[in-house]
Amino acid sequence: MPRRTVIIGGGAAGLGSAGGVKAADPEADVVVYTQFEDVAYSPCGIPYVHGGEIPDFERLFLAGKQAYVDAGIDIRYETEVTAIDTAAHTVEVAGEGTVRYDSLIIATGFDYADPGVPGGDLSGLYYVKNIRKAMEWDKVIEKTERAVVVEAGPLGLEMVTALAHRGVETHLVDPNPYALAAMADPDIMAPVEQSWRELGVHLHFNTTLEAFLGDGNGAVRAVRTSDGEIPAELVVVATHKTPNNELAAAAGLKLGTTGGIIVDERMATSAPDVWAAGDVSEIPHGLTRTPLQGLTGSHAYAQGKTAGTNAGGGDRAYRAVFVPWATPAGKWVIGGASFGETTATALGIPYVTGEAQGISRARYYPGVQPVRVKLLAEPGTLRLIGAQMIGGGEGIKERADFLAQAIRFGLTLNDLSTMENVYSPAIGALNEPIVLAATDGVAAASKG
């Protein structure tokens, strides 16, 4: 009999897991359960359809349903797993009863944190996640005059820009002093906030959400905050991601301080033959060993491949993360790796910085864009420990990827200040901004 792997969840981690199992054991019986109508689409692309940068939702689908049938992956759509029995190696499935597994992968994803204020049951509160619901919400946005985005995390940034591009009067409410405060530094975010103001966005920082107010017919009409009442027909609730861990907790799996499932480098959980991947799990930061949960889609997919490979009898490890990240925000693209000054200060990590303002290509070539790089290094050794960037778009993602690897392998500011770089007027400036920032850091450290 072929070994049966049951996967709960059809997102990036779940489908990555399915592919990993089949790669390790082509004869494996792989069953994926998802509560939704679809799998293998990019929820990260939803804000860009709302903003008009992507013309339609169909482009977000990565493959048709037949592709998974052809690959030998049995996907059960709109089907809920209600319980896990790790001792019996079974799951309870609505409409199917008890289903046996040899290997189980939990990829149940995330939920948005409950705002914890009155009015949470009103219509007009949009939680961006499911593509079919997003299609319907897009019609609502078309008729919306005023909207509020709650919290300026990664999704909040994208939705603020998207709504502004759609001509909606947009308000951003966040309890922190600036946007993306959990990831970015205030000097990186200041140009983003200015670009939002230029788009007509109203920013309400250091502002606490107090209630969603209804119109008497069950629909939201306003948001009450510590800064006053903001009228709105639509509220995008972009609170932080929390692990959808109810099944795992009920099954007795060990959870970490983030609420995510604790896994080892093979993505194995505390229960035999059970793996977990994606937003439901927690992963250590490579430098601080601080547990992290709710990372990006690329992290979820890679974790899924690791879990699936091992569940299928192969051998693959997922290492601690250094978190390269980047996203458009207003008219800018921001990014970084590991952490910035705000996080380092909060964790009590000493650092020195090197900063530089550079350009994306030769100064005389059409379309040249600014690129600002800030590097954090360990005092004394000058070993790179973090980076933050902002630019017009070109190269931010690629620099974030490179700098995360530089941190992983212990490169220093001295290494970066003397590194080679491509010079071609159309694609790269003579002076690479990373080199300039590293050189600045070396000079500053030598002085003091």
Image (tube, rainbow, N blue to C red):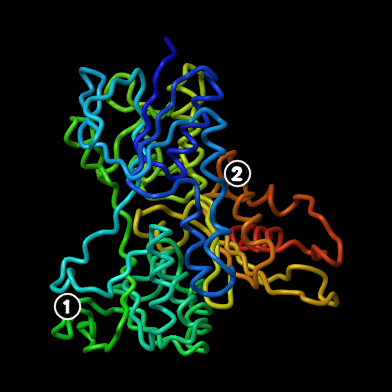
**Nearer to me, 316 or 352:** 316
Q: Residues within 10 Å of mark 2 (few under 14, many from 20)?
A: some
Residue shown at the point (49%, 27%) measured from the top left = 317
**Nearer to me, 372 or 48:** 48
Q: Quadrant of residue 424?
A: bottom right
User: Where 418 sits versus 247, above or below?
Assistant: below
The residue tagged 2 is 405
Identify the disc placed on residue 442: none
Q: Quadrant of residue 64?
A: top right
Earlier sequence position, callout 1 versus callout 2? 1
| Residue 169 position within the rendered picture, expressed as x and y whole percent measured from the top left | 41, 88
| Residue 204 position within the rendered picture, expressed as x and y whole percent measured from the top left | 33, 83
In this rendering, position of residue 89 left or right of residue 48: left
Q: Residues within 10 Å of mark 1 (few under 14, many from 20)?
A: few
Q: Quadrant of residue 163?
A: bottom left
Residue shown at the point (56%, 49%) measured from the top left = 62
Q: Amino acid at mark 1?
A: Gly
Q: Give the quarter of the figure containing the N terminus.
A: top left
**Nearer to me, 328 or 430:** 328
The residue tagged 1 is 218
Residue shown at the point (84%, 59%) measured from the top left = 423
| Residue 8 position within the rendered picture, expressed as x and y whole percent measured from the top left | 34, 36
Q: Give the quarter of the figure containing the C terminus.
A: bottom right
| Residue 54 position within the rendered picture, expressed as x and y whole percent measured from the top left | 58, 68
User: Where 224 sits versus 387, above or below?
Assistant: below
Q: At numbered mark 2, what does the secondary structure look like: helix, strand or loop? A: helix
Residue shown at the point (19%, 37%) measured from the top left = 249
Q: Between marks 1 and 2, how big is the CA–CA gap?
A: 50 Å
Q: Amino acid at mark 2?
A: Gln
Of badges 1 and 2, the one in the foreground is: 1
